[in-house]
Amino acid sequence: MGSTDPTNVLVPLDGSECSRRALEFAVALADRFDADLHVVHFSDHQTDATDTIIDRAHETVEAAGLEDDPELIESTSGIRNANHVGAAILELVEDRGYDHVVMGHHGEGTVGRAILGSAAETMLRSEAVAVTVVPTVERAANDGET
């Protein structure tokens, strides 16, 4: 049986607090297993906000002493829907051979999953790659309560 340690980790960011937490987790994971780390942000066009997401990701990765050049992937097909983002992540996993995806999840309930969390749900349901989902701080705290 082969090793299950990650060697090529993908972190899709959306600029939210939970995606920032996912990046921090992925940085620690990549460092722990000496894995390659790649950060990506999907958008239908480049803006100051997308530049900020990429710049902050670069600072986080650089501060950890890892090498990566966070990437903005622009889509002309209107990638605003979270289901489309999930499909785009799966395509990237297949094309580039990632063996682990770390992503944030901030959707709660039916509406939250439909609007905010379906990209994470798409990844989990695919079973194409190992996925670590990092919740919001509030959700992590609530899940720890008894």
Image (cartoon, rainbow, N blue to C red):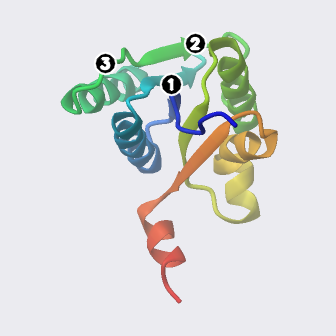
Residue 105: percent from the left, percent from the top? 57, 51
Q: Earlier in the sequence, mark 3 or mark 2?
A: 3
Q: Amino acid at mark 3?
A: Glu
Which residue position holds label 3? Answer: 67
Q: Which one is closest to the eye, mark 1 or mark 3?
A: 3
Which residue position holds label 2? Answer: 74
Q: Earlier in the sequence, mark 1 or mark 2?
A: 1
**Compared to 115, does 37 lie above or below?**
above
Query: Which of the 4 image quarters holds residue 103?
Result: top right
Tell me if mark 1 has few (under 14), some (14-19) or many (20+) residues whose alpha carbon lies within 10 angstroms of its own: many
Residue 6: percent from the left, percent from the top? 52, 34
- CA distance for labels 3 and 2: 22 Å
Query: Which of the 4 image quarters holds residue 112?
Result: bottom right
**Can residue 78 be seen by looking at this rendering?**
no
Disc 2 is placed on an element classified as: strand
94 to the left or right of 4: right
Q: Amino acid at mark 1?
A: His
Disc 3 is placed on an element classified as: loop
Q: Amino acid at mark 2?
A: Glu
Disc 1 is placed on an element classified as: strand
Which residue position holds label 1? Answer: 41
| Cβ–Cβ under 8 Å for marks 1 and 3 | no
- CA distance for labels 1 and 2: 8 Å
130 to the left or right of 126: left
Q: For the view shown, which residue lies furthest in the front direction?
A: 1
Residue 47: percent from the left, percent from the top? 43, 18
67 to the left or right of 137: left
User: In percent of the image, x 76 and y 62: which residue is there?
Assistant: 110
Question: In this orientation, which residue lies closer to the viewer: 84 or 26?
Answer: 26
